[in-house]
Image (tube, rainbow, N blue to C red):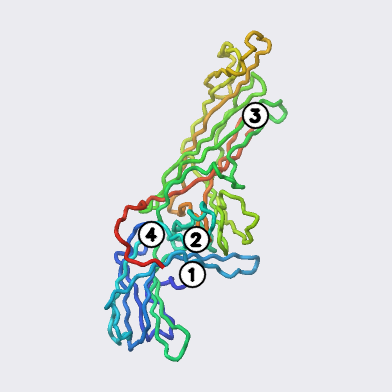
Amino acid sequence: MSLQKSTASRTSWLPSRTRQEALIDIVIDRHFESKIYTSGSAVSGYVTLASQSDVTFKGLDINFIGATSTHIHMLQYDSTPSSHTFLRLNMPIPEGALPGSRILEAGRSYHIPFAFVVPHKLSNTACKCPAAAVHERHIHLPPTIGSWEYNDIATHAVRVEYAVRARLVLRQDNSKKVKSIESHHPIKVLPYFPKRPPLYGNLESPTCRLSQKKMFRKNMLSRKLGHLEAVVTQPDPVVLSIDRLQTSGSLVLVDLEFTPASGTAGPPQVYAKSASLEVYTHFSLHHIDYLPDQHNRPSSASDPVAPYWNSHELTLEKPERPVWEQSSESCLVKNPRRGSEVPEHGPVRATRSLSVGSCQGSQSDESNETESVTYKASLFLPFQLPSIRKRLFLPTFYSCLVCQTYEIKVVLTAGPYGTSLSLTVPCQIAAEGCSPGSDTRLPGYVRA
């Protein structure tokens, strides 16, 4: 179910035809509009029922609900919105809180307390995906989407909402149709998201490029000088602080290797031309049974997954010039190159490694001696995400209808004529909060 319409106001919401029957008000203890709840946070308070006339009722339900809603624009037509209630916690009504006669007396107020705890994970039945890796990701709570004071980057076609709901079921004597009065009190939830290992093992993303190799020339008309290869390493996760909504910095490491075509060619100067954060919001009207940023869409999948993409420029913090190291493999170690023969293209530190296996049976024949020279270097690119004043980068998460993932795209430039190499690597945004198991109190609710 979607809470979008009914959560427009935090106070009582009632159709006009029932306003004279009863009023429902939900009060959450120590709540304020910008308060953020996380894993293990207590959500407690009370529901007040009041009526100007006697009202006969059948029962009262108090729930803590989490729901996702999506819709997809198909040309000029809108699809039917899809919704998924992934969390429903029921609060037992204390005995004696409501009259045994099941009649709300006119002019009297009834206060019913409630107490919930934001769970660290959903129940296993919240996701029916058969793939264990996908199921494990889907039973983590998604963050609130669409209700922040900041731009949370995601498309308007997606909403994730949390709310305390109170529903009074009225008794109807001559009708089979159930009549009820509801009120919702929305809250913002930013769950705990732990750091995860790098994704290299099972990465099949069509948008990632972890390495690129290009032929390098001094200019357009000159002969080939060699090949330059760049390999990027996934950075450590960026950590989002839940209390301040601030993110930590991280570092992109690019390993460089230059293989010259001749012994006189030296490594080029390499620097980072640009860097950007690529944000992907994958959403669907039906269950997403794979991880869109890691796996290609299965051929058996019949329901489309719509990607929403936007890019944000990153500011690199004083990237250093790479220092090249010369590495060679030969059967006989020759005299090091004279200083006058060291290439002038960039800083070089000479090292040599002897290939023992290739030397067997060839040491007596110096005419067959060959030497393969390569230059290696590392480029360190520290970065920070853009300021929270403009936008909010939510944690990386996967759920049944919505996933939000991030990648970093780095463009390198080499040599005086700007030979470019483009690399794209996954980047996780984690969230600091209450770690699982830190709250040993028994929850004051019953799982649906």
356 relative to 235, above or below: above
* Mark 4 or mark 2, earlier in chain: 4
Rendered residue at 27%/84% (across/down): 108
* Mark 3 or mark 1, earlier in chain: 1
Q: Are there few (<14), some (14-19), or many (20+) residues within 10 Å of tag 4?
A: some
Q: Are there few (<14), some (14-19), or many (20+) residues within 10 Å of tag 3?
A: some
- Residue that mark 1 sits on: 2
Compare residues 43 and 96 and report the one nearer the observer.
96
Instruction: Classify residue 150 as left or right of residue 223.
Output: left
Q: Are there few (<14), some (14-19), or many (20+) residues within 10 Å of tag 2?
A: some
Rendered residue at 32%/71% (across/down): 27
Check residue 227 in the rendering and tell me which mark sits there, or answer none. 3
Check residue 119 in the rendering and tell me which mark sits there, or answer none. 4
Q: Amino acid at mark 4?
A: Pro
- Residue that mark 2 sits on: 127
Closer to the observer: label 4 or label 2?
Answer: 2
* Mark 1 or mark 2, earlier in chain: 1
Q: Position of residue 330 (x, y in %)?
A: 61, 16
Closer to the observer: label 4 or label 1?
Answer: 4
* Mark 4 or mark 3, earlier in chain: 4
Q: Amino acid at mark 3?
A: His
Q: Residue furthest right?
A: 221
Q: Amino acid at mark 2?
A: Cys
Whole-angstrom CA distance, mark 4 to mark 1, is 20 Å
Q: Position of residue 132 (x, y in %)?
A: 51, 53
